[in-house]
Image (cartoon, rainbow, N blue to C red):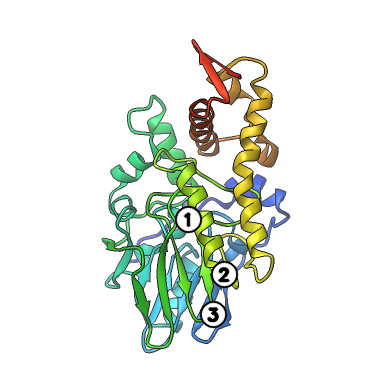
């Protein structure tokens, strides 16, 4: 049988980001780290920076994998070593599931609200909010170049509170919406270890750059994690935390208000949306000149901030001009 060649992501595309984080050139296979008995963290290549994302492997009478954004080499290595009987996806973003296509014949599940975007590219682009835009084709092209969007097997569903069991270890689904409607974390109750996926406590997030994202839900989800009070917090793109977790989560949530304050400062001078966007107020300080899809994300996030600030009567809109009240 001739194997279809599958393109890897264009790693060079990420160099500005990776360089900024001093990880340039650290391309390698992922590796397993035992967090608790039968509970493993699968470190992704490039230390989990996009296009890769860390995964969780639960072992026992059966083996369960949470997320597949490890890249084909790591997934193929994993599949040789472990008989995976179930794959769970934390949410629909491709950096967390772009190797689902290597799990034909294995059941794959995601939250009810995100599974439709995993099963249809049309829904995926609808969730992004690009359908009908003048630059829809361009954003589609750059998005697919950014991370391979290979359609995997059909994804079934799970819901908040569902428990998945390997016979040795249990994982409970914790619905943490905001980053996406069906974004989920997973709690191992005995060790109070949480895999919080893209609630990452990193410098890039909180991220809510698709139309279907909700800043307000994101804040509530961080509060939910604080209430769980994890002893270990594993995220998809950053090193896991064993101490100062509550403070890290609170600081992460506070970044949303820091962004609001930055916008309020800029809007002391009345500005159109286009004028404000041209300043790239949310991400330019992190990655310099913004290209697609980053520039699209920034646009969506800026709209959400302005909607919040006008709703809270901290910003007024007169004609096309926004200004601080
Ligand atoms: Zn994500």
- Kindly identify which residue carries mark 3: 191
Alpha carbons under labels 1 and 3: distance apart: 27 Å
- Kindly identify which residue carries mark 2: 230
How far across and how far down the image is residue 162, in percent?
33, 70
Near mark 1 (Cα within 10 A), the count class, few <14, some 14-19 or many ≥20, is: many
Q: Quadrant of the N terminus?
A: bottom left
How far across and how far down the image is residue 248, in percent?
66, 58
Q: Secondary structure at mark 1?
A: helix
How far across and how far down the image is residue 260, in percent?
61, 34
Whether the residue under disc 1 has CB within 8 Å of ligand 1: yes
- The earlier-in-sequence mark between 1 and 3 is 1
The answer to whether 27 appears left or right of 101 in the picture is right
Query: In front here: 53 or 179?
Result: 179
Q: Secondary structure at mark 3?
A: loop
Query: In front here: 70 or 124?
Result: 124
User: Which marked residue is nearer to the observer: mark 1 or mark 2?
Assistant: 2
Identify the residue at the far top of this view: 319
Tell me the quarter of the picture where residue 49 sits.
bottom right
The answer to whether 177 appears left or right of 250 in the picture is left
The residue located at (31%, 56%) in the rendering is: 115
Alpha carbons under labels 3 and 2: distance apart: 9 Å
Does the residue at mark 3 contact the one at mark 2 (Cβ under 8 Å)? no
Does the residue at mark 1 contact the one at mark 2 (Cβ under 8 Å)? no
Residue 95: image tag: 1
Query: In front here: 143 or 215?
Result: 215
Alpha carbons under labels 1 and 2: distance apart: 25 Å
Residue 260 vertical placement versus 108 (above, below) = above
- The earlier-in-sequence mark between 1 and 2 is 1
Residue 198 visible in the displayed image: no
The answer to whether 258 appears left or right of 8 in the picture is right
């Amino acid at each position: 049988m001739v194997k279809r060649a599958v393109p890897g992501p264009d790693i060079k595309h990420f160099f500005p980001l990776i360089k900024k984080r001093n990880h340039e050139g650290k391309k390698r296979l992922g590796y397993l780290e035992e967090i608790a008995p039968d509970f493993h963290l699968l470190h992704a290549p490039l230390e989990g920076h996009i296009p890769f994302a860390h995964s969780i492997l639960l072992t026992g009478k059966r083996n369960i994998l949470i997320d597949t954004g490890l890249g084909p080499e790591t997934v193929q290595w994993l599949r040789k070593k472990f008989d995976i009987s179930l794959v769970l996806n934390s949410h629909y973003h491709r950096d967390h599931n772009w190797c689902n296509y290597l799990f034909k014949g294995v059941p794959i599940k995601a939250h009810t609200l995100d599974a439709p975007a995993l099963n249809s590219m049309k829904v995926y682009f609808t969730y992004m909010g690009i359908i009908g835009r003048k630059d829809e084709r361009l954003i589609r092209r750059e998005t697919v170049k950014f991370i391979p969007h290979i359609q995997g097997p059909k994804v079934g569903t799970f819901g908040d509170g569902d428990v998945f069991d390997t016979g040795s270890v249990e994982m409970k689904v914790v619905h943490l919406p905001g980053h996406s409607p069906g974004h989920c974390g997973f709690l191992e109750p005995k060790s109070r270890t949480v895999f919080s996926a893209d609630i990452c406590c990193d410098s890039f997030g909180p991220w809510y750059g698709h139309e279907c994202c909700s800043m307000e839900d994101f804040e509530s989800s961080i509060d939910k994690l604080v209430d769980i009070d994890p002893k270990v917090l594993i995220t998809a793109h950053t090193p896991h935390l064993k101490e100062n977790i509550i403070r890290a989560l609170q600081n992460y949530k506070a970044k949303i208000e820091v962004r609001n304050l930055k916008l309020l400062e800029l809007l002391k001078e009345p500005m159109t949306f286009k004028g404000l966007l041209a300043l790239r107020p949310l991400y330019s300080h992190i990655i310099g000149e913004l290209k697609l899809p980053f520039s699209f994300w920034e646009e969506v996030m800026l709209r959400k901030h302005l909607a919040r600030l006008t709703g809270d009567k901290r910003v007024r809109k007169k004609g096309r001009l926004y200004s601080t009240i």
